[in-house]
Amino acid sequence: MDRRYAVILGNLGNTKDRFCGSYKESPATADMLQQAAHIPHVSGIELVGTWDISPANLMEMKLALADLNLTCVSVIPDLFGDSRYWKGAYTSTQPEVRRHAIDYTKQMCDIARELSCEIVNLWPGQDGYDYNLTADYAAQRDWMCEAVTELATTYPDLRFALEYKPKEPRTHSTLARMADSLLLAQETGCSNVGVCIDTGHAFVAGETVGESIVLARRAGNRLFHMHFNDNHGTWDDDMIVGTVHTVRYLEILYWLDRSGYSGWFSMDQYPYREDAAGAIGESILWLRRFDEILETHRDEIDVLVAADDAVRTSRFLREVLLR
Amino acid sequence: MDRRYAVILGNLGNTKDRFCGSYKESPATADMLQQAAHIPHVSGIELVGTWDISPANLMEMKLALADLNLTCVSVIPDLFGDSRYWKGAYTSTQPEVRRHAIDYTKQMCDIARELSCEIVNLWPGQDGYDYNLTADYAAQRDWMCEAVTELATTYPDLRFALEYKPKEPRTHSTLARMADSLLLAQETGCSNVGVCIDTGHAFVAGETVGESIVLARRAGNRLFHMHFNDNHGTWDDDMIVGTVHTVRYLEILYWLDRSGYSGWFSMDQYPYREDAAGAIGESILWLRRFDEILETHRDEIDVLVAADDAVRTSRFLREVLLR
Amino acid sequence: MDRRYAVILGNLGNTKDRFCGSYKESPATADMLQQAAHIPHVSGIELVGTWDISPANLMEMKLALADLNLTCVSVIPDLFGDSRYWKGAYTSTQPEVRRHAIDYTKQMCDIARELSCEIVNLWPGQDGYDYNLTADYAAQRDWMCEAVTELATTYPDLRFALEYKPKEPRTHSTLARMADSLLLAQETGCSNVGVCIDTGHAFVAGETVGESIVLARRAGNRLFHMHFNDNHGTWDDDMIVGTVHTVRYLEILYWLDRSGYSGWFSMDQYPYREDAAGAIGESILWLRRFDEILETHRDEIDVLVAADDAVRTSRFLREVLLR
Amino acid sequence: MDRRYAVILGNLGNTKDRFCGSYKESPATADMLQQAAHIPHVSGIELVGTWDISPANLMEMKLALADLNLTCVSVIPDLFGDSRYWKGAYTSTQPEVRRHAIDYTKQMCDIARELSCEIVNLWPGQDGYDYNLTADYAAQRDWMCEAVTELATTYPDLRFALEYKPKEPRTHSTLARMADSLLLAQETGCSNVGVCIDTGHAFVAGETVGESIVLARRAGNRLFHMHFNDNHGTWDDDMIVGTVHTVRYLEILYWLDRSGYSGWFSMDQYPYREDAAGAIGESILWLRRFDEILETHRDEIDVLVAADDAVRTSRFLREVLLR
């Protein structure tokens, strides 16, 4: 196994929700980096723009990462926490807000280059709508396409991973599902626009992640990045991998390999009330255990997915999972 | 308003589920046609292959439709009720089953031509999977694409509407959502492959239908057909339009017009325990009432969808809906 | 472990849905019994009224069960497949239908007595409603309470297990959730009225089954019966235990023991496209494997449920499940 | 109509979520009171403990309310925003946290008395669990019951309304549904323990609110309070009444009257990106319009809920709603 594991730095920080402003302490960035570096098997870091990384601390961060032997895996521009974007960033009805969002993202692209980080992970969380008959869906898609195209053509050396999510913080996101996002990626005409699957987002969307991986593969090999977590099925609970679903992860790993995915395996959790490093470390260990099973039984799984026999699949899973 | 309304003939027949084999009587086809023709505003009929139409009754049906002044709006090949397709039709792992499904569909295409019916509505209900690790998603998509491509190239004068649905009868369908179906339509390279939106299927998929209409428009003007019904949100309850959701239908009609949709408005319900003609007639009357509101207030809605102001939209809806 | 396993006989028969009238052959009752008896670890059978058991074949069935060394675990009156009850059985607005449903159930109670079967499992599938503003919820609950009370007082030696389910075949069931059913059981004033948990029904209801078991325990020790299956979370897919969820079953078994449950473990699946005996056998083997894990680690789980530490629970699960 | 309308004061304040710490300005309490008093038809206010009301500002608040001619309708102790309760308040595994939560609530009860406010609305948002096998459901229910019993017996002149909600901020709440909460209310043996229905919480729980009202009525007339809002069905979106669902609200008002509810109609929204006073005012106007329809057509609805005829109900709704 040559999987490379990463974590989004903010996972190690404070947690909050709309009711409680702070469940935990807010550690310093340096402390979070230290913690991340000490999670077994972690060698990559994703940095959220503004929160973790900005022109002001770029050199400092570069040194810190080098010191800790951490690779910056992706930069995630903050398109969700800045109240300027409260009614959309790339799809705001206000041209000056859209402009600001694109320019800000470019700043983050420059930072990514500086960090030798190839992936810019775009999660435009505020782009969407809440109520029926309050949004022009055609214009929104135009604007989203224009923004992503401008970014992708300006930075042809970077790869832009669209992280889709059906809802939250808006009741409906513009990039809601795998196939919607692929259509948009294709519309840009840029081969450096692809997708990031967050497993939990896909669960909430009702997708079978194995199948979403196949869709991305067929639409021009556009799976650029992976975020891992688990949930109870209807909301982005951002839990430890394997604590709700089990079989799904084995299937996901199988299809990642079959589609030739060679990117990072990044943990994206929101450990509201858990020890963060512990929760992230657990997810990696679950994934590694699933990988061991996959390594040993890949040929049998090849046969099972061709066989279309649920009883046989059940027997296999029972025997190899619950040995 | 120049909407044209249709109904799927079988809506007027018997109803059943996995527990009860028959809630109603099974009327003769001629009686169902009579009933359909008498539902106010109905001028079109959709016929399910084998159940309603076959080479054996083709001439008889042609005459009956002419007598009743009904247009055949679409032919729906039976890819869901034939136990031969219990584990898939176009995506069966058995080559001879896939061949059978394609050949059978061609027979239905010939019938459509004979009835001067331009639309073949493909709802491949049995194509999908139930359990993880029992299906080869890549092969399934290859097979689906091959089948649809063969059909579309063999019958360039017909238009093939892919009716997507996230689940039922399989726990997961191959054509599950709007954007998945558009990707497949594009893969065929045929401009006569498009989609049919069943409003209830889209609700279960978590889609905003107005937005799905926009997606189809952008992907090559591929919205070919519309099926109307309502549900409680998590299952294809196939209920009377307007009895659960209200605002959504006004939005759907608005976006159909904005996208230039000129096809049929077909009712697709499953009135388990209701008077079928009454239930279908109700849906049409709800839609006509929504259309009257739309006609009177289209300019205001243009303003609202650009305004991004939920309070203003609420005020409008309250005042025009609940006058 | 002294678990006793059973199966609902009809699980071994034909399967169908509203689209396809028959996915399989319909084996003879005698053949289904033979098959059931040969599923490893099965020693009990549940019989559906009318379908499997009636005054006409009672003696024959008694002999057949004795021959096969099978215990009749419960009788399930057919309150779901008889079109007479299409708009409700115990809660029909028609008094004569309600009377019929009660009288028919009494006939089934007599049969249960004759078979020395203590449990009558009531799944009033047709009791509920489909549309808002079409049902008198107060009257429905009165009628349901009257029916169950009449049954429970007429047959004080039998135990009536109310099997709740949120929906299907109605869009909303009268007995939808654990706590609703407990309230009704308490209203009857009869200690021989309790509940049956179908794990899949509870999943769809959004319940944590371990917690539902605790509720039943607190409300007068009213957990009388258990039906096992799995699903994808939003519909009663009636799948093989363990193929979607894993951790939940371990938790369920733990809480069954903590609440002192000593009833049967009955499999209730609907193997549309699977070998039925194989699918049922698989569920039992998954449950037995979970039980082995539970036996070995019960004390650790006692500590975990008191500890409120998700990381620690994750580590335990990963280590004992995926050894 | 003699409905009395109220609003939760905090609805007029800042909004935030886990991504964005502040979408709006935070107005001063006095300004929010002013705004509330000017929303048409509002004559009552709900105050959240600590945030809006505390021993320190009690006299000031009393005067302010009198000045504005506002009645304090309920006090809502802050059991959700205090990080001390991050892993539960009444059901924390830490005895000293449970003690603190009860003592704090008593402080709020004293304040309620002082304000001549009869209702203490308990929303124990942090009481629940996130992961399977991390909580002792039996102990949690004991602790919840002990806390509520201590409060209800200490303050027999107050009425305690349990506000249930299936999830958020925990993935699972201890008081998740109507019937669960009624069971707990009954367990306390106190007639001054009842429930508050938040319509949106009930929607997410899959409940038909009309039916939930009937359940509360039957279980000792325990419906004490009502919170109104709307959502898209799977999450507590806290939107303007009527913007998603329509028919449901007419049904809710009908059943409130049939059950003899005479409490307040309080708006509980979370207008993330909306003008708060506008959004709240809209909900009241929707409700008042539904009430006008109900006033005019109550007898027809009486007939419809007895008639069990969806086509007839649809015709009525179409004609009276979309006149």
Image: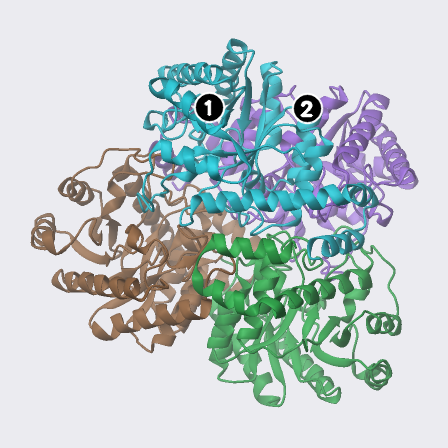
Chain colours: A cyan, B purple, C green, D brown
Q: Could you say where residue B232 lies in the image, as x and y percent from the top left?
A: 55, 49
- Residue D216: name its quadrant: bottom left
* Quarter of the image where the N terminus of chain B is located: top right
- Relative side of A103 to D193, left or right: right
Residue drawn 53% across and 57% down?
C206
The amino acid beneath tag 1 is: Ala
- The percent coordinates of residue B246 (x first, y second) are 48, 42
In the figure, residue A276 lies in which quadrant? top left
Task: Determine which residue is flagged by label 2.
Answer: A219
Q: Nearer the viewer, residue C272 or C274?
A: C274
Q: Seen from this angle, which residue lies furthest top?
A: A154
Mark 2 or mark 1, whichever is nearer to me: 1
Q: Where is residue A226 in the image (x, y as percent from the top left)?
A: 58, 32
Residue B284 occupies quadrant: top right
Q: Which amino acid does label 2 sit on?
A: Ala
Q: Mark 1 points at which residue?
A: A66
Question: Would you say residue B306 is visible in this rendering?
Answer: yes
Say what secondary structure mark 1 lies in.
Answer: helix
Q: Which mark is residue B209?
A: none
Label whose residue precedes the other's in the sequence (2 or 1)? 1
Q: Mark 1 lies on which chain?
A: A
Between residue D221 and residue C307, name the one nearer to us: C307
